[in-house]
Image (cartoon, grey):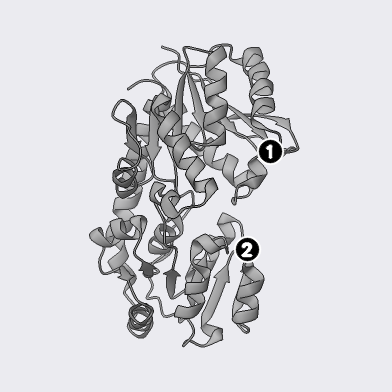
Amino acid sequence: MNSSVVILLPNIHRNAQPVTELLARQDFYASYLRKYSDTQFRKPLVIISGANNIADFENIEVHSISSKPINVSVFALKSLKVIKGILPNPGSLVAGTPFQPFLIALILKLFIPRTKIHTAIHGEIGALKRGGLSNLLKLSFLRLFLRRAHSVRFVSRKQAEDARMFVKLSKVKTFIAPVPYIADSAGSNKLNTSSLIAFVGRIQQERGVEEWMEVVEPFGREQLMIIGEGPLAQTMKTTLLGATFTGALTNKEVQGKWTEIGVLLSTAPYESYGLAMREALLHGVPIVSKENAGAIELEQRYPNLIKLYRTKDQAQQYLKGFLEKPLDKKEFESFRKDFFAEQDESLIRLAKVWLNEV
Protein backbone atom coordinates (compact mmCIF):
# COMPACT_ATOMS: atom_id res chain seq x y z
CA MET A 1 0.00 0.00 0.00
CA ASN A 2 1.38 3.41 -1.03
CA SER A 3 0.75 5.87 1.82
CA SER A 4 2.94 8.77 0.63
CA VAL A 5 1.08 12.08 0.40
CA VAL A 6 1.54 15.26 -1.66
CA ILE A 7 -0.45 18.38 -0.69
CA LEU A 8 -0.99 21.04 -3.37
CA LEU A 9 -1.36 24.68 -2.30
CA PRO A 10 -0.92 26.96 -5.34
CA ASN A 11 -0.79 30.75 -4.95
CA ILE A 12 -0.94 30.45 -1.19
CA HIS A 13 -0.71 34.23 -0.71
CA ARG A 14 -4.32 34.62 -1.87
CA ASN A 15 -5.64 32.69 1.11
CA ALA A 16 -7.29 34.84 3.78
CA GLN A 17 -5.24 33.02 6.41
CA PRO A 18 -1.54 33.92 6.91
CA VAL A 19 0.82 31.52 5.13
CA THR A 20 2.47 30.30 8.34
CA GLU A 21 -0.89 29.50 9.92
CA LEU A 22 -2.13 27.67 6.82
CA LEU A 23 1.01 25.54 6.76
CA ALA A 24 0.73 24.95 10.52
CA ARG A 25 -2.68 23.44 9.83
CA GLN A 26 -1.16 21.07 7.25
CA ASP A 27 1.46 20.15 9.85
CA PHE A 28 -1.34 19.42 12.33
CA TYR A 29 -3.06 17.14 9.79
CA ALA A 30 0.27 15.41 9.16
CA SER A 31 0.71 14.74 12.89
CA TYR A 32 -2.33 12.47 12.60
CA LEU A 33 -0.86 10.79 9.51
CA ARG A 34 2.27 10.08 11.54
CA LYS A 35 0.29 8.75 14.49
CA TYR A 36 -2.11 6.52 12.58
CA SER A 37 -0.05 5.29 9.63
CA ASP A 38 0.03 1.50 9.32
CA THR A 39 3.29 1.71 7.40
CA GLN A 40 6.57 3.59 7.86
CA PHE A 41 5.71 7.29 8.03
CA ARG A 42 7.07 9.64 5.41
CA LYS A 43 6.51 13.36 5.80
CA PRO A 44 3.89 14.66 3.35
CA LEU A 45 5.34 16.82 0.61
CA VAL A 46 3.61 20.23 0.59
CA ILE A 47 4.10 22.12 -2.67
CA ILE A 48 3.29 25.83 -2.66
CA SER A 49 3.66 28.96 -4.77
CA GLY A 50 3.24 32.62 -3.92
CA ALA A 51 5.51 32.59 -0.86
CA ASN A 52 9.06 31.84 0.21
CA ASN A 53 11.24 31.96 3.34
CA ILE A 54 9.04 29.25 4.84
CA ALA A 55 9.75 28.06 8.39
CA ASP A 56 10.52 24.41 9.08
CA PHE A 57 7.75 22.14 10.35
CA GLU A 58 7.95 18.90 12.28
CA ASN A 59 5.60 16.76 10.20
CA ILE A 60 5.66 18.19 6.66
CA GLU A 61 8.28 18.95 4.00
CA VAL A 62 7.48 22.25 2.28
CA HIS A 63 8.69 23.09 -1.22
CA SER A 64 8.05 26.56 -2.66
CA ILE A 65 8.29 26.35 -6.44
CA SER A 66 7.80 30.10 -6.93
CA SER A 67 7.66 33.14 -4.67
CA LYS A 68 5.26 34.73 -7.17
CA PRO A 69 1.80 33.68 -8.40
CA ILE A 70 1.90 31.21 -11.30
CA ASN A 71 -0.78 29.69 -13.48
CA VAL A 72 -2.15 26.15 -13.32
CA SER A 73 -0.04 24.61 -16.08
CA VAL A 74 3.24 26.07 -14.78
CA PHE A 75 2.46 24.95 -11.22
CA ALA A 76 1.60 21.45 -12.46
CA LEU A 77 4.80 21.07 -14.50
CA LYS A 78 7.04 22.42 -11.72
CA SER A 79 5.25 20.25 -9.15
CA LEU A 80 5.75 17.16 -11.30
CA LYS A 81 9.48 17.82 -11.40
CA VAL A 82 9.63 18.12 -7.60
CA ILE A 83 7.48 15.03 -7.08
CA LYS A 84 9.51 12.88 -9.47
CA GLY A 85 12.68 13.88 -7.66
CA ILE A 86 11.37 13.08 -4.18
CA LEU A 87 8.25 10.87 -4.34
CA PRO A 88 8.14 9.33 -7.83
CA ASN A 89 4.79 7.58 -7.25
CA PRO A 90 2.82 9.23 -4.43
CA GLY A 91 -0.21 7.35 -3.19
CA SER A 92 -2.27 10.51 -2.67
CA LEU A 93 -2.56 13.99 -4.12
CA VAL A 94 -4.41 16.29 -1.74
CA ALA A 95 -6.00 19.33 -3.42
CA GLY A 96 -6.73 22.07 -0.89
CA THR A 97 -9.87 23.16 -2.77
CA PRO A 98 -11.94 21.60 -5.57
CA PHE A 99 -10.99 24.33 -8.03
CA GLN A 100 -7.44 25.36 -9.01
CA PRO A 101 -5.61 22.81 -6.81
CA PHE A 102 -7.98 20.07 -7.96
CA LEU A 103 -7.39 20.92 -11.63
CA ILE A 104 -3.64 20.72 -10.98
CA ALA A 105 -4.13 17.30 -9.37
CA LEU A 106 -6.05 16.10 -12.42
CA ILE A 107 -3.15 17.17 -14.67
CA LEU A 108 -0.61 15.45 -12.42
CA LYS A 109 -2.65 12.24 -12.46
CA LEU A 110 -2.06 12.00 -16.21
CA PHE A 111 1.63 11.43 -15.35
CA ILE A 112 1.05 9.54 -12.07
CA PRO A 113 -1.95 7.36 -13.00
CA ARG A 114 -2.02 5.20 -9.85
CA THR A 115 -2.26 8.13 -7.43
CA LYS A 116 -5.58 8.98 -5.77
CA ILE A 117 -6.93 12.51 -5.58
CA HIS A 118 -8.45 13.82 -2.37
CA THR A 119 -10.03 17.25 -2.10
CA ALA A 120 -12.16 19.32 0.27
CA ILE A 121 -15.11 21.68 -0.03
CA HIS A 122 -15.10 24.41 2.61
CA GLY A 123 -17.95 26.66 1.45
CA GLU A 124 -21.61 26.10 0.72
CA ILE A 125 -22.07 24.88 -2.85
CA GLY A 126 -25.50 26.49 -2.73
CA ALA A 127 -23.75 29.87 -2.67
CA LEU A 128 -22.66 29.21 -6.26
CA LYS A 129 -26.31 29.34 -7.31
CA ARG A 130 -26.39 33.09 -6.64
CA GLY A 131 -25.57 33.76 -10.27
CA GLY A 132 -22.69 35.47 -12.00
CA LEU A 133 -20.32 34.01 -14.56
CA SER A 134 -17.64 33.05 -12.01
CA ASN A 135 -20.09 31.09 -9.84
CA LEU A 136 -21.62 29.42 -12.90
CA LEU A 137 -18.20 28.27 -14.13
CA LYS A 138 -17.26 26.93 -10.69
CA LEU A 139 -20.50 24.98 -10.35
CA SER A 140 -20.13 23.57 -13.88
CA PHE A 141 -16.55 22.53 -13.10
CA LEU A 142 -17.66 20.69 -9.96
CA ARG A 143 -20.45 18.89 -11.80
CA LEU A 144 -18.08 17.79 -14.57
CA PHE A 145 -14.92 16.84 -12.69
CA LEU A 146 -15.53 16.30 -8.95
CA ARG A 147 -16.61 12.71 -9.61
CA ARG A 148 -12.98 11.98 -10.60
CA ALA A 149 -11.84 12.46 -7.01
CA HIS A 150 -11.21 9.42 -4.84
CA SER A 151 -12.55 11.30 -1.82
CA VAL A 152 -14.23 14.60 -1.01
CA ARG A 153 -14.07 16.00 2.48
CA PHE A 154 -16.85 18.21 3.81
CA VAL A 155 -16.62 20.37 6.91
CA SER A 156 -20.16 19.78 8.19
CA ARG A 157 -23.03 17.32 7.75
CA LYS A 158 -25.42 20.02 6.57
CA GLN A 159 -22.90 21.18 3.97
CA ALA A 160 -22.51 17.61 2.68
CA GLU A 161 -26.28 17.13 2.44
CA ASP A 162 -26.70 20.39 0.52
CA ALA A 163 -23.79 19.61 -1.82
CA ARG A 164 -25.35 16.33 -2.93
CA MET A 165 -28.31 18.33 -4.25
CA PHE A 166 -26.04 20.02 -6.81
CA VAL A 167 -23.25 17.51 -7.53
CA LYS A 168 -23.42 13.75 -8.12
CA LEU A 169 -21.01 12.00 -5.74
CA SER A 170 -22.47 8.49 -5.58
CA LYS A 171 -19.17 6.87 -6.62
CA VAL A 172 -16.92 9.13 -4.57
CA LYS A 173 -15.87 8.47 -0.97
CA THR A 174 -17.19 11.34 1.18
CA PHE A 175 -16.53 12.10 4.83
CA ILE A 176 -16.86 14.87 7.39
CA ALA A 177 -13.76 16.54 8.87
CA PRO A 178 -14.17 20.15 10.04
CA VAL A 179 -11.36 22.68 9.92
CA PRO A 180 -9.45 21.95 13.15
CA TYR A 181 -9.10 24.34 16.05
CA ILE A 182 -5.46 24.46 17.10
CA ALA A 183 -4.88 26.09 20.48
CA ASP A 184 -3.42 25.42 23.91
CA SER A 185 -6.58 26.41 25.77
CA ALA A 186 -10.23 27.28 25.25
CA GLY A 187 -11.11 29.98 27.74
CA SER A 188 -12.20 29.76 31.35
CA ASN A 189 -15.37 28.97 33.26
CA LYS A 190 -15.81 32.52 34.60
CA LEU A 191 -19.09 34.34 33.98
CA ASN A 192 -18.90 36.43 30.82
CA THR A 193 -20.03 39.99 31.62
CA SER A 194 -18.63 41.78 28.56
CA SER A 195 -21.03 44.04 26.63
CA LEU A 196 -19.02 43.95 23.38
CA ILE A 197 -20.65 42.74 20.15
CA ALA A 198 -18.02 41.34 17.76
CA PHE A 199 -17.49 40.80 14.06
CA VAL A 200 -14.76 38.21 13.39
CA GLY A 201 -13.55 37.40 9.89
CA ARG A 202 -12.70 38.90 6.54
CA ILE A 203 -14.54 42.19 5.99
CA GLN A 204 -16.13 41.54 2.62
CA GLN A 205 -19.56 41.41 1.01
CA GLU A 206 -19.84 37.64 1.42
CA ARG A 207 -19.78 38.11 5.21
CA GLY A 208 -22.95 40.22 5.18
CA VAL A 209 -21.13 43.40 6.25
CA GLU A 210 -23.95 45.80 5.29
CA GLU A 211 -26.47 43.76 7.28
CA TRP A 212 -24.10 43.59 10.27
CA MET A 213 -23.90 47.38 10.38
CA GLU A 214 -27.70 47.65 10.17
CA VAL A 215 -28.25 45.18 13.01
CA VAL A 216 -25.86 46.95 15.42
CA GLU A 217 -27.19 50.44 14.59
CA PRO A 218 -29.08 50.85 17.93
CA PHE A 219 -26.06 49.87 20.02
CA GLY A 220 -23.36 52.26 21.22
CA ARG A 221 -20.24 52.35 19.07
CA GLU A 222 -18.16 51.63 22.19
CA GLN A 223 -19.92 48.24 22.31
CA LEU A 224 -18.62 47.16 18.89
CA MET A 225 -15.40 45.29 18.09
CA ILE A 226 -14.47 44.39 14.51
CA ILE A 227 -11.69 41.82 14.18
CA GLY A 228 -10.38 41.40 10.66
CA GLU A 229 -9.47 43.20 7.46
CA GLY A 230 -10.83 43.27 3.94
CA PRO A 231 -12.15 45.34 1.03
CA LEU A 232 -15.06 46.80 3.04
CA ALA A 233 -13.00 47.71 6.12
CA GLN A 234 -12.96 51.41 5.31
CA THR A 235 -16.73 51.40 4.78
CA MET A 236 -17.21 49.93 8.24
CA LYS A 237 -14.79 52.41 9.81
CA THR A 238 -16.61 55.34 8.23
CA THR A 239 -20.07 54.08 9.20
CA LEU A 240 -19.16 52.90 12.70
CA LEU A 241 -17.04 55.78 13.97
CA GLY A 242 -15.98 55.07 17.54
CA ALA A 243 -16.03 51.28 17.21
CA THR A 244 -12.90 49.24 17.95
CA PHE A 245 -11.11 47.95 14.84
CA THR A 246 -8.22 45.55 15.44
CA GLY A 247 -7.23 44.93 11.83
CA ALA A 248 -6.02 41.49 10.77
CA LEU A 249 -4.88 39.32 13.68
CA THR A 250 -3.12 35.97 13.92
CA ASN A 251 -5.04 32.99 15.30
CA LYS A 252 -3.24 33.35 18.61
CA GLU A 253 -4.12 37.04 18.83
CA VAL A 254 -7.78 36.32 18.05
CA GLN A 255 -7.86 33.71 20.81
CA GLY A 256 -6.71 36.38 23.24
CA LYS A 257 -9.61 38.65 22.22
CA TRP A 258 -12.45 36.27 23.05
CA THR A 259 -12.30 37.17 26.76
CA GLU A 260 -13.23 40.76 25.80
CA ILE A 261 -16.30 39.76 23.76
CA GLY A 262 -19.86 39.39 25.04
CA VAL A 263 -21.62 38.17 21.88
CA LEU A 264 -20.53 37.16 18.38
CA LEU A 265 -22.83 38.47 15.65
CA SER A 266 -22.60 36.58 12.34
CA THR A 267 -24.53 37.92 9.35
CA ALA A 268 -22.95 35.74 6.65
CA PRO A 269 -25.72 34.36 4.41
CA TYR A 270 -23.60 31.33 3.52
CA GLU A 271 -21.43 29.59 6.10
CA SER A 272 -20.66 25.90 5.79
CA TYR A 273 -18.87 25.42 9.09
CA GLY A 274 -18.19 28.69 10.85
CA LEU A 275 -14.86 28.18 12.61
CA ALA A 276 -15.20 31.60 14.27
CA MET A 277 -18.55 30.51 15.70
CA ARG A 278 -17.04 27.36 17.17
CA GLU A 279 -14.11 29.34 18.58
CA ALA A 280 -16.62 31.67 20.22
CA LEU A 281 -18.45 28.79 21.90
CA LEU A 282 -15.16 27.22 23.00
CA HIS A 283 -14.38 30.48 24.80
CA GLY A 284 -17.81 30.85 26.35
CA VAL A 285 -19.13 33.49 23.94
CA PRO A 286 -22.75 33.04 22.74
CA ILE A 287 -23.77 33.68 19.13
CA VAL A 288 -26.49 35.47 17.23
CA SER A 289 -26.40 34.33 13.62
CA LYS A 290 -28.24 34.57 10.35
CA GLU A 291 -29.62 31.21 9.26
CA ASN A 292 -26.97 29.32 7.27
CA ALA A 293 -25.75 25.72 7.09
CA GLY A 294 -23.11 26.00 9.79
CA ALA A 295 -25.30 27.94 12.23
CA ILE A 296 -28.31 25.67 11.75
CA GLU A 297 -26.24 22.60 12.59
CA LEU A 298 -24.95 24.25 15.77
CA GLU A 299 -28.36 25.52 16.86
CA GLN A 300 -29.91 22.09 16.51
CA ARG A 301 -27.47 20.71 19.10
CA TYR A 302 -26.91 23.73 21.36
CA PRO A 303 -30.04 25.93 21.22
CA ASN A 304 -29.15 27.82 24.43
CA LEU A 305 -25.78 28.95 23.07
CA ILE A 306 -26.74 30.20 19.61
CA LYS A 307 -29.82 32.03 18.35
CA LEU A 308 -30.77 32.19 14.68
CA TYR A 309 -32.52 35.25 13.30
CA ARG A 310 -34.52 35.98 10.20
CA THR A 311 -35.20 39.69 10.71
CA LYS A 312 -33.11 42.62 11.90
CA ASP A 313 -35.44 43.21 14.87
CA GLN A 314 -35.13 39.58 15.91
CA ALA A 315 -31.32 39.78 15.80
CA GLN A 316 -31.35 42.90 17.97
CA GLN A 317 -33.62 41.24 20.54
CA TYR A 318 -31.32 38.22 20.79
CA LEU A 319 -28.26 40.45 21.20
CA LYS A 320 -29.92 42.39 24.02
CA GLY A 321 -30.98 39.14 25.67
CA PHE A 322 -27.46 37.73 25.79
CA LEU A 323 -25.97 41.05 26.96
CA GLU A 324 -28.57 41.63 29.68
CA LYS A 325 -28.48 38.06 30.99
CA PRO A 326 -25.04 36.52 30.32
CA LEU A 327 -24.79 32.74 30.22
CA ASP A 328 -22.74 30.94 32.85
CA LYS A 329 -19.73 29.48 31.11
CA LYS A 330 -20.53 26.08 32.59
CA GLU A 331 -23.29 25.91 29.97
CA PHE A 332 -20.55 25.68 27.35
CA GLU A 333 -18.81 22.64 28.86
CA SER A 334 -20.90 20.13 26.91
CA PHE A 335 -19.98 21.86 23.66
CA ARG A 336 -16.25 21.81 24.52
CA LYS A 337 -16.32 18.14 25.40
CA ASP A 338 -18.19 17.21 22.22
CA PHE A 339 -16.05 19.47 20.02
CA PHE A 340 -12.65 18.06 20.91
CA ALA A 341 -13.85 14.45 20.90
CA GLU A 342 -15.44 14.88 17.46
CA GLN A 343 -12.43 16.79 16.12
CA ASP A 344 -10.09 13.98 17.12
CA GLU A 345 -12.37 11.38 15.55
CA SER A 346 -12.68 13.34 12.29
CA LEU A 347 -8.91 13.86 11.99
CA ILE A 348 -8.27 10.13 12.49
CA ARG A 349 -10.76 9.52 9.67
CA LEU A 350 -8.99 12.10 7.48
CA ALA A 351 -5.62 10.46 8.13
CA LYS A 352 -6.91 7.01 7.19
CA VAL A 353 -8.44 8.33 3.95
CA TRP A 354 -5.34 10.29 2.89
CA LEU A 355 -3.16 7.28 3.69
CA ASN A 356 -5.46 5.11 1.53
CA GLU A 357 -6.07 2.76 4.46
CA VAL A 358 -9.88 2.84 4.19
Q: Nearer the viewer, residue 217 or 223?
A: 217
In what element is the residue under mark 1? loop
Few, some or many C-alpha atoms within 10 Å of disc 2 (few <14, some 14-19, many ≥20)? some
Q: Quadrant of the C terminus?
A: top left
* Residue 51 percent coordinates (x, y): 71, 39
Q: Nearer the viewer, residue 197 or 208?
A: 208
* Residue 101 percent coordinates (x, y): 56, 33
Task: Tell me the number on the disc at residue 171.
Answer: none
Q: Which residue is mark 1?
A: 55
**Nearest to N terminus: mark 2 or mark 1:** 1
Residue in the picture at 30% in, 49% down: 158
Indicate the quadrant where residue 333 lies: bottom left
* Residue 186 percent coordinates (x, y): 43, 59
In what element is the residue under mark 2? loop
Left or right, residue 42 beside residue 66: left
* Residue 104 percent coordinates (x, y): 57, 27
Q: Which residue is mark 2?
A: 229
Query: Pointers 2 and 1 in contact (CB under 8 A)?
Result: no
> In this view of the protein, can residue 248 be seen by the observer?
yes
Q: Nearer the viewer, residue 2 or 161?
A: 161
Question: Label 2 vs label 1: CA separation?
Answer: 24 Å
Q: Amino acid at mark 1?
A: Ala
Residue in the picture at 52% in, 31% down: 102
Q: Amino acid at mark 2?
A: Glu
Left or right, residue 187 beside residue 70: left
Left or right, residue 73 beside residue 215: right
Residue in the picture at 66% in, 26% down: 73
